[in-house]
Image (cartoon, rainbow, N blue to C red):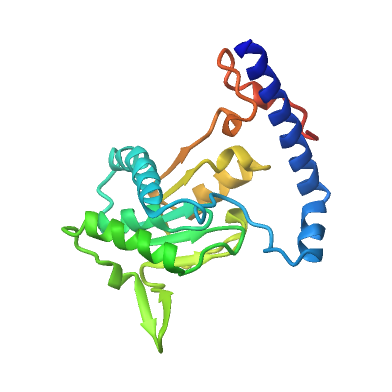
C-alpha cells in the first residue's frame, strides 16, 4: 500500500541521515574526498546545482519572510546587517542591500562563496527585478585588473564560526535561515549576538523545525529533536 511505501522511504531516509551524520562526526567523508580529490567539505545551502530562476525564487522567499520581521523594529536604511551561514551564495544579503541596508557581513564557516557565472547570473536577475532601488550590482562587485570581487564596503565575507568572529563596528540586525537548528551551543551564539548588536539591534532567525524533512512526523514536527545527539 501507499502507506507502507511511505514508511519504507522514511526508514531509508533515516538510515542515510544517520550514516551521513556519523561520517561527518568521524570525518570519514573528509578522508574520502581527499583520496578521490573531491571538493573540500562544505556547509549551508548548495545552490550550484539549481537554475537561476530557482535561486532567485528561493532568495525572495527567504527575504520576504525575514524582512517584515526586522522592519517591525526599524527602517533598515543605512543599517549594518549580518547573515549567518548562507552557504554558497549572497543572494539574500544582496536583497537587503537593494532595500537600502548600508552593509552586510556574511559569516560562513566553510569557504563556499565564489564569484562564478551562476552567482553573477543570479545577482544580475535580482538586480533587474529591483532596479528601482538605490544600489546596483556594480556597487557590490568590483572589477579590479580583470578580476571580479565583492566590494568590502557592501559585502564583507568572513570564513569563520559566528561566535568566534570579531567586528570593528556594532551590528544593527542579524539574521539566519535554516542555521540555528545545526548549532551545537545555542547559548553561545545568542550571547555573542547580544554583545555585537547595537542597543536596539535585533536577531531574527528562520528555524527548520522539521529536521529538513528527514525526520518529519506530521503529528509531532519536533520529533527529530528527541534523537540522541550521537545519531
What residue occupies the far left of the structure in this picture? 132
Q: Residue at x 46, y 69 (%)?
A: 116
Please name the residue shown 37% across and 59% down the image. 122
Most extreme residue toward the bottom is: 145
Q: Quadrant of the N terminus?
A: top right
Q: Is any atom of residue 214 visible in this view? A: yes
Q: Position of residue 59 (x, y in %)?
A: 38, 48
Measured from the top left, where is residue 2 in percent x and y?
Answer: 60, 13
* Residue 6 placement: quadrant: top right
Q: Residue at x 65, y 18 (%)?
A: 5
- Where does residue 192 sit, x and y in percent of width and height? 56, 50
- Tell me which residue sits at (75%, 41%) in the image: 21
Q: Nearer the viewer, residue 188 or 199?
A: 188
**Which residue is nearer to you in this view: 168 or 126?**
126
Res. 27 in view? no
The location of residue 164, given as percent across then percent down, is 62, 58
* Left or right: where 51 falls relative to 140: right
Q: Is residue 216 left or right of residue 70?
A: right
Residue 73 appears left or right of 187? left
Residue closest to the eye, 17 or 38: 38
The total of numbered circles placed on residues is 0
Residue 63, placed above or below residue 39: above
State which quadrant residue 104 falls in.
bottom left
Looking at the figure, which quarter contains the C terminus? top right
Amino acid at each position: 500500500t501507499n502507506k507502507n511505501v511511505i514508511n519504507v522511504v522514511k526508514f531509508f531516509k533515516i538510515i542515510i541521515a544517520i550514516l551521513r551524520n556519523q561520517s561527518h562526526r568521524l570525518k570519514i567523508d573528509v578522508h574520502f574526498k581527499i583520496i578521490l580529490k573531491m571538493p573540500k567539505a562544505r556547509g549551508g545551502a548548495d545552490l550550484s546545482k539549481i537554475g537561476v530562476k530557482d535561486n532567485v525564487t528561493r532568495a525572495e522567499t527567504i527575504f520576504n519572510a525575514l524582512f517584515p520581521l526586522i522592519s517591525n523594529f526599524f527602517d533598515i536604511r543605512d543599517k549594518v546587517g549580518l547573515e549567518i551561514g548562507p552557504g554558497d551564495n549572497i543572494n539574500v544579503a544582496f536583497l537587503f542591500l537593494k532595500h537600502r541596508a548600508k552593509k552586510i557581513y556574511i559569516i560562513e564557516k566553510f569557504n563556499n562563496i565564489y564569484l562564478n557565472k551562476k552567482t553573477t547570473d543570479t545577482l544580475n536577475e535580482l538586480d533587474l527585478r529591483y532596479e528601482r532601488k538605490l544600489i546596483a550590482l556594480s556597487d557590490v562587485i568590483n572589477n579590479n585588473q580583470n578580476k571580479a570581487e565583492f566590494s568590502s564596503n557592501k559585502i564583507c565575507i568572513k570564513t569563520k564560526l559566528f561566535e568566534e568572529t570579531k567586528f570593528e563596528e556594532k551590528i544593527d540586525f542579524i539574521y539566519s535561515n535554516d542555521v540555528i537548528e545545526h548549532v551545537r551551543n545555542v547559548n553561545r551564539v545568542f550571547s555573542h549576538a547580544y554583545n555585537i548588536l547595537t542597543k536596539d539591534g535585533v536577531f531574527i532567525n528562520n528555524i527548520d523545525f522539521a529536521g529538513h524533512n528527514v525526520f518529519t512526523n506530521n503529528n509531532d514536527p519536533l520529533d527529530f529533536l528527541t534523537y540522541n545527539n550521537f545519531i
